[in-house]
Image (tube, helix red, strand yellow):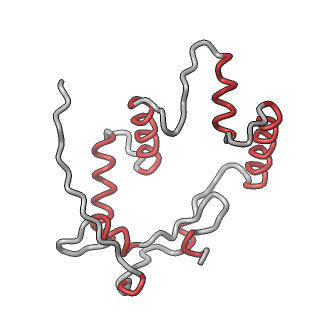
């Protein structure tokens, strides 16, 4: 199946803080906090341990831990170079599929249907005629916590 060109017009008119009078918070703060199996202190310690070890092995200060690991991965014959900017279409798709499966864990849906389920949920949470998805997301806001337990909305 050949790939056909797609024309997309992108117009972005961001909601400014002064215009943000209709923001809703449809869930309680508790509902925004995911449950993690790993204790944050354990996660942080393991990340520090791995990062320090990789830094000692490859002390180039311009490299991130991911880049250091990718250099070390050269010793595995079947490994592929994986970087944020040089990923294959397949790896990008797999990552999107994995995230969609996390967000919409219905095994009866394919990736496209999972994405549409998210869009439909957005329209339920922020109703309104003629609103584009970006406008709906801006009105919804982002009160989710991060894996360190702090919402970006709470940083200001």
Q: Which residue is found at the position 61% from the left and 57% from the top?
A: 35
**The image quarter in which residue 72 lies:** top right
Q: Closer to the camera, 21 or 14?
A: 14
101 to the left or right of 39: left
Residue at 33% across / 70% down in the picture?
125
Q: Would you identify the image quadrant in which residue 154 lies?
A: bottom right
Based on the displayed image, in which of its 4 quarters is residue 58 positioned?
top right
Q: Nearer the viewer, residue 149 or 69?
A: 69
- Horizontal and vertical percent position of residue 150: 63, 68
Residue closest to the eye, 95 or 110: 95
Q: Quadrant of the N terminus?
A: top left
Left-right relation of 117 to 152: left
Q: Determine whether, in the image, residue 119 is placed left or right of residue 7.
A: right
Q: Is residue 42 above or below residue 74?
A: below
Q: Position of residue 5 (x, y in %)?
A: 17, 38
- At x 65%, y 19%, the residue is 74
Q: Is residue 7 above or below residue 144?
A: above
Quadrant that contains the C terminus: bottom right
Q: How many marks?
A: 0
Q: Position of residue 89 (x, y in %)?
A: 38, 31
Q: Position of residue 31 (x, y in %)?
A: 53, 68
Q: Is residue 86 above or below residue 125?
A: above
């Amino acid at each position: 199946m050949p790939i056909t060109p797609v024309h997309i017009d992108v117009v972005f008119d961001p909601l400014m803080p002064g215009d943000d009078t209709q923001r809703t918070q449809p869930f309680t703060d508790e509902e925004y906090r995911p449950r993690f199996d790993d204790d944050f202190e354990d996660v942080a310690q393991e990340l520090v341990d791995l990062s320090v070890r990789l830094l000692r092995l490859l002390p180039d200060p311009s490299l991130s831990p991911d880049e250091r690991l990718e250099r070390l991965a050269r010793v595995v014959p079947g490994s592929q170079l994986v970087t944020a900017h040089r990923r294959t279409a397949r790896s990008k798709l797999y990552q999107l599929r994995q995230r969609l499966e996390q967000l919409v864990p219905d095994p009866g849906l394919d990736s496209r249907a999972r994405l549409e389920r998210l869009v439909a949920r957005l329209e339920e949470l922020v109703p309104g005629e003629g609103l584009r998805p970006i406008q709906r997301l801006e009105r919804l806001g982002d009160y989710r916590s991060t894996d360190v337990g702090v919402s970006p909305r709470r940083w200001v």
